[in-house]
Amino acid sequence: MGLGVQAMFGLFLQAMVVLFVEEAKAGHVFFNTSRYSGKKQVSGGCNLFQGKWVFDPSYPLYDSSSCPFIDPEFDCQKYGRPDKQYLKYAWKPDSCDLPRFDGVDFLSKWRGKKIMFVGDSLSLNMWESLVCIIHSSVPNVKTNFVRKTPLSYVTFQDYGVTLYLYRTPYLVDLVKESVGVVLRLDSIEDGNNWKGMDVLIFNSWHWWLHKGKSQPWDYLREGTKLYKDMDRLTAFYKGMSTWGRWVDLNVDPSTTKVFFQGISPTHYQGREWNQPKKSCNGELAPLSGSTYPAGAPPEASVVSKVLSSIKKPVYLLDITTLSQLRKDAHPSSYNGDHSSNDCSHWCLPGLPDTWNQLLYAALL
């Protein structure tokens, strides 16, 4: 009798494995964000981040003129961008379909929950995108909108869902000391403001490159050591490692899901896609295919290294390559906030909507 039960159990397991594989092939399995736990990277189902951009006339997911939450720096249509083709591209993973964002489903599943984006203006870009996608699904739902520094939020009152944005470009602390403004590579006092969230989406990198007048600190500090400067990748690694220790010490995975937004690329240097005289300005279409000529930026390796050292589950929204392909999706000169050519941020509607579709898939 015992052997019969074992045999039946074995057949059951085989059937379940076959079913899982078939579901994965059909695009119905979505634990596809890269998960880092300890030193082991775990991923299953389809890789949502490997694919290509395809023309899709059903896009965009919303109209910028109907979303009251978009900042001038991202509102490319309002500020004169003449083309609209960049709005019509959808991300198509190679071996499955990316689920279309359902705002009502999102609000229903996360009823009464708190979701926070923590980081720089790329976090702002993604936060505004998510708010606009949801708002377009429930345009008549009452909202409470507060915009301040460092904390902003939108609450969809009928559902009790609040989307927060906490602006802190380095994640680690920027403080005034007697010597001047100091970037403390080993301190995260701001982290007290991130506790109690149901979902945390972190981002940092672009400000680590700022120098001269755009650099907001005078010194870097690590313990008792004060530095006038250091290699920026090294500084980024030290700061990110401090953030990683904060996650391990302060996050309860049973109540809080943690994501890292991934490195958002810039398109100032056309040589990266074999057109050395160009930048994002005037670009009308994505790069074809699924690889970027210049390859992955070194800061992405820093992120991977730090994530692999974190013991708690952190899910990487690995947006770098798919975003590198979108040289056409930046505001360039069509924005109401930057007088220069902006090849760093992204138009809304636009690429960050795909980032949020990937987040939505990860949360399903």
Image: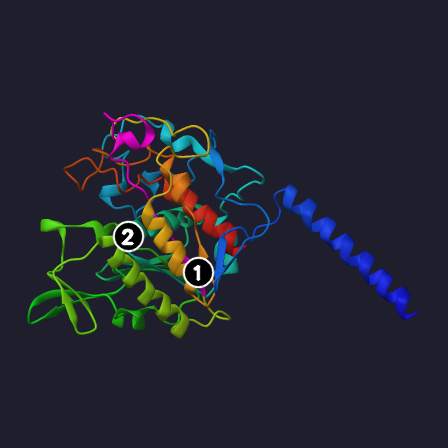
Residue 313 appears left or right of 177 = right
- Residue 308 is labelled as 1
Q: Position of residue 230 (x, y in %)?
A: 18, 57
Q: Position of residue 327 (x, y in %)?
A: 33, 33
Q: Distance from label 1 to label 2 (Cα)?
A: 18 Å
- Residue 205 is labelled as 2
Mark before the other along the chain sequence, 1 or 2: 2
Q: Which residue is depicted at the point 42% across and 50% down?
A: 134
Q: Quadrant of residue 325?
A: top left
Residue 272 appears left or right of 15 = left
Q: Are marks 1 and 2 in contact (CB under 8 Å)?
A: no
Residue 27 visible at all: yes
Residue 354 appears left or right of 347 = right
Q: Position of residue 180 (x, y in %)?
A: 8, 66
> Magenta-highlighted stretch: main secondary structure?
loop
Q: Which residue is depicted at the point 43% across and 32% down?
A: 89
The type of residue carrying mark 2 is Trp
The type of residue carrying mark 1 is Ser
Q: Quadrant of residue 201?
A: bottom left
